[in-house]
Structure formats: C-alpha cells, structure tokens
Image (cartoon, rainbow, N blue to C red):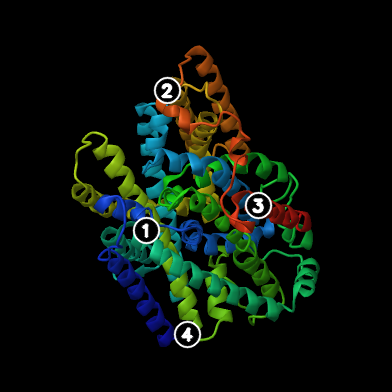
Amino acid sequence: MSSFDWVVIILYLLAVVGLGVAAGFLRRKGETGGEGGHYFLAGNTLAWPVIGLAMFAANISTVHLVSLAEAAYKFGLVFGNFEWMAGFTLILLSLFFAPLYLRSKVATLPDFLERRFNRGCRDVLSVVSLFSAIVIHMGVALYTAAWVLRGILGLPPGATLLGMDALMLFIIVLGLLTGIYTMVGGLLAVVWTESLQTVLLLVGAIVITAVGYLKIGGWSELAHTLASNAHPLAGVENSQVTWGTANFLNMARTADDPSGLAWYSILLGYPVLGIWYWCCDQTIVQRVLAAKNEKHARLGPLFCAFLKIWPVFFFVLPGIICVALVQKNAFGGAAPQTAADTYTFLITHLLPIGLKGLVAAAMLAAAMQTCSAALNSTATLVAYDLFKRHKPDISDHRLVQIGKWTTVIGTLLAIVASPLFGHYTTIFEGINKLISYVAPPITTVFLLGVFWKRASGRSALITLIAGMGLGAVMFVVDWNGLYKGDFMLIAFLLFAACLVIMIMTTCLFPEPLKREARPLIWEDWREPLRGEAQGHGLGNYRLASVAVLGIFAALYLVFH
C-alpha cells in the first residue's frame, strides 16, 4: 500500500463519519413521527430502492468479502448457497411478513410479537435481538474489519501495535468511529452511509473480479487450471481437499464433501436460518418498518433479493480465482498467509495505486455500515421495548437520548465480544453456527404465529424459552469440541423440535385469538397473493416475486 492509498483510506473514512453526522442535523419537511420517528425510523420516508440497498448493505459487509473469499479459497462455490438461498426467504418477507408489519405500525419486531402473543414473548425476543445485534452483527463485523486492516498493513497474526494486540486496537478504533456517526445521525445516517458504501463496495468487488478473471484467462482456463493442478494450497493448513472443478465450481455437494455442506443440509437448514435473519431480525427488517407504505415495503426486499445474485460472482468467485492464480504461480510464488487473507491479498496484488486504497476503504466502511445498522436497531429496541413500554408518556426527545446512550454502550459491548470469532475455523463458519443455535425457536414462533391462528401465546413463550435452552446446549457442546457435525442439519433438527413443542403446548394450553391479533395473521396463505396489487410490470410485487424466483431457479440449474 502506497502513501496515496493511505490518504484515500483516511479521507474516505472521515467522509463517511461526516456524512453520518450531517444526517443528524437535517430534518425533512413533512416527516411524520416527530423526533423519535425521525431518529429510529427515518420518519417513515424510505422508498423501495433505498430499502433494498440498505437491507443489502446491512447484510453485505467486510464479513462477506473476507469470509466468502476465504471459504471459496478452501472449498469453492458451495458457500455461495448462503447468498442465493437468501433470495427465496426475501420473497417470503415481501409476500407474507412485510404487509403485516406495516399494518401493525410497530417500531420493533418484539412489539409485533407482543401484539400477536403476549408480553413475555416480546421480552424474550428483545433479549435475543440485542444479543444478535451486538454479537452476531457488530462483533463479527468489527473482528473481520480489524483482520483486513492487519492484512493491509502486512502484520502477522498476533502482532502488537502501540503496546497492545494490533487486532484489538483496530477493533476499538473502528468501533468508536462507527459509534460516533450512528449516535448522532440515527437511522437516516445509517441508510445514507449504507447506500453510498454499497455502491462503492460493489464497484471495488467488480473491479477485483474482472481483473482476476482477465488475468486467469477466462472461465475455461479457470476450470482447466483447477482440474489439472490438484494439490493443497498455501494458507490452508493440513488440507485434504482435492482442488478440482467438481469441488470448486458446483453449488450442490455430496455428504462426503470437505466443506461439510451437503445439498440436503442446505435445503433443510438454510430456510431456518434465513427466515429468522431476513424476516424476523430487527437489524435487517428495520428498513422495511421505515417504508413509506406497503408497496415500498414489499418491493424493497425484492430489490434486495435481486442484488443477492451478485455476491456469488463478486465475493465468492474471487477466492476461486485466487486459487487458480496461485496454482499458475501468477504472483511469483506469493500466496495468502492464511485463507482468511485471500481478499486482502487480491487487493494488494491485483489493483493499481489509488484503487487499492479505495477498495480497502470500502471494505472497512462495509464493516462500519453493518455495525451502524446493528447499533441503530439496538437503540430502537432499548428505547421502545425497555423504556416506552413501561413509560408510555415518555417524550420523543428522551427516547432519542436513551437511544444515543444505548449506541455508546452497544459499541463497547461489541468491541468486547469481537474476539469470540477467532475461536472458529473460519469467520463465516462462526457467524452461521451462532445463527443456527439462535434462529430455530424464533423462526418457529413467527411462522406459526402468522399462518396458524390457533397458536397460543403461552405455547409461543414456552417454545422460545425451550428453544433457546436447546440452542445454548448445542453451543456449549460445539464450543468445547464435543460435536463437529453438520450445523445446518442441527439447525433443522432444532427447528423440528421447536415445531413439536409449540404444536403440543398449543393443544395443551389453548387460548382464544386476541382481537388485536386478528390483523396480524393470514387466514389463508394465498390471501397475500389475491386482490389488487399496486404498480405495473416489475412494480407489481407479484410479478417481481415470480421474476426473482425464476432467476434463482435458473442459476441453480446452471451451477447445480
């Protein structure tokens, strides 16, 4: 990295913080919801392009750039399933969940769960949502961004800087920068910075993919190189993987694949993780809650689904290209220090001066945008679910103050939690394992709550508590190395157990459907597909859903 690259990085990060702070001092005429509505839900002014970009940005962070390239360097395209399967769950959000959320006019998903079931369910989901925002979203993003910065500086793992561990120093600095503009600007700052950073992130990823693709000589040469140079690679410790096209360029794998992701595991397990993440997680869904109206709330997730096509080609494929380039000795014998360094290795070896700094800045900013999204959702949860529910007459100004203090505390907790992810073999494995232990009971309660009117509040609370207990047990078992099996299948089995628990306890403890809960359920699953849909062409959410479904189905046929 040249001095000019470092100037670009510093200026860009200062610009992002400045933009976020500026958003906090601007007010749009005609906004509804007062100061609190502006700070937490951007005054319900978001249109579908911004919602889709913001959802995509909150999901796509440095975690994806680093961990997907890392996983691809080791196992090929198979981890791209986490991107393309998301398209199907985003269709569910658009068709079935978003309209109910908008009609209920809730600020948080725990609030929705209380209206559907009871206050106990709201309390449990609030705690879990806070955990997921601070640990799963923010913690992993800060850890990955710090790892990237270490790689850019060329520091070895475990290096010290200014008398402390370099990784921890970078986590603290990036966490504090993010906390500043999120605290001042609220959700509007988050959305503005997310939209800008997503565009830059995609441009950088496209450039790296294009340069690498041209350097390797196209798809045929890529496949030929992988097939004819089958051996373990640098940066992959004790590798027993056969580096061939059958392993690398197919999405569907058999049970004996080294990745541990058989096709049936993904088919059964991903919907459990995906429905929680895309349909029931406050950090992601908050953008939908801030939509102008139901039409924008439906189209936003579908636009995000369309955007989810591209990470496989621009975030996963670079890791595979790096494999082939290393095998062809394109870097004069150089290779990533570890598999986790794959993406930063490509940046420093493929891009020209100036562009290196811009892409590196985009990677750091991507982590910051994920953290800022999680911080804002955390502030919203604490302000509305822990304070306003107990003091309904609390002023908007006081709620905003609470939200800002929550942002400060959340930043500190995320900094402390970040090193947790160094325990796992890969960063992507760590984040998805944690999700697989958290998601099953929440997915169960939301699905049955929305589609089964007999589902009772008591059964929902029992399912949440029991499911979290089972998940905690599996986490301890996994953390201590007592079980090293397929975490996607574990997620599905936990989901099946939660389904049985909720159905049985509903039968044991039946309750009449609350009057205020009637608008929050579908009497018939076909109900959202009926009636008049606003918009024409792809502006009609039903046609847009069919188009997105067809695109993903075609992609799977090509890369099966």
- State the residue position of label 2: 514
- Disc 3 crowd rating (10 Å Cα; few below 14, some 14-19, many 20+) is some
Q: Is residue 294 above or below residue 472?
A: below
Q: Left of 342 or right of it: where is 421?
A: left
Identify the residue under disc 3: 543
Alpha-carbon distance for marks 1 and 4?
Answer: 26 Å
Q: Nearer the viewer, mark 2 or mark 4?
A: 2
Write down the residue under mark 1: 372
Q: Percent from the top left, x then y, of residue 408?
A: 26, 54
- Could you say which is closer to the camera, residue 546 or residue 196? 546
| Point 46% across, 25% down: residue | 460
Q: Going from the N terminus, do you reach mark 1 or mark 4 first? A: 4
Q: Residues within 10 Å of mark 2 (few under 14, many from 20)?
A: some
Q: Amino acid at mark 1?
A: Ser
Q: Position of residue 242 (x, y in %)?
A: 75, 59
Under tag 1, what secondary structure?
Answer: helix
- Quadrant (top left, top right, bottom left, bottom right) of the C terminus: bottom right
Which of the two labelled residues, at mark 1 and mark 2, occupies the earlier sequence position? 1
Task: Give the residue type at disc 2.
Answer: Lys
Residue 354: image tag: 4
What distance separates the C-alpha of mark 4 from that of mark 3?
43 Å
| Neighbourhood count class around disc 4 (C-alpha, 10 Å): few under 14, some 14–19, many 20 upward | some
- Mark nearer the N terminus (4 vs 3): 4
User: What's the CA distance linking mark 3 and mark 2?
Assistant: 34 Å
Tag shown at residue 138: none
Measured in 3D between alpha carbons, the distance from the residue under mark 2 to the one under mark 4, in whole angstroms, is 60 Å
Q: Position of residue 390 (x, y in %)?
A: 23, 33
SS for tag 3?
helix
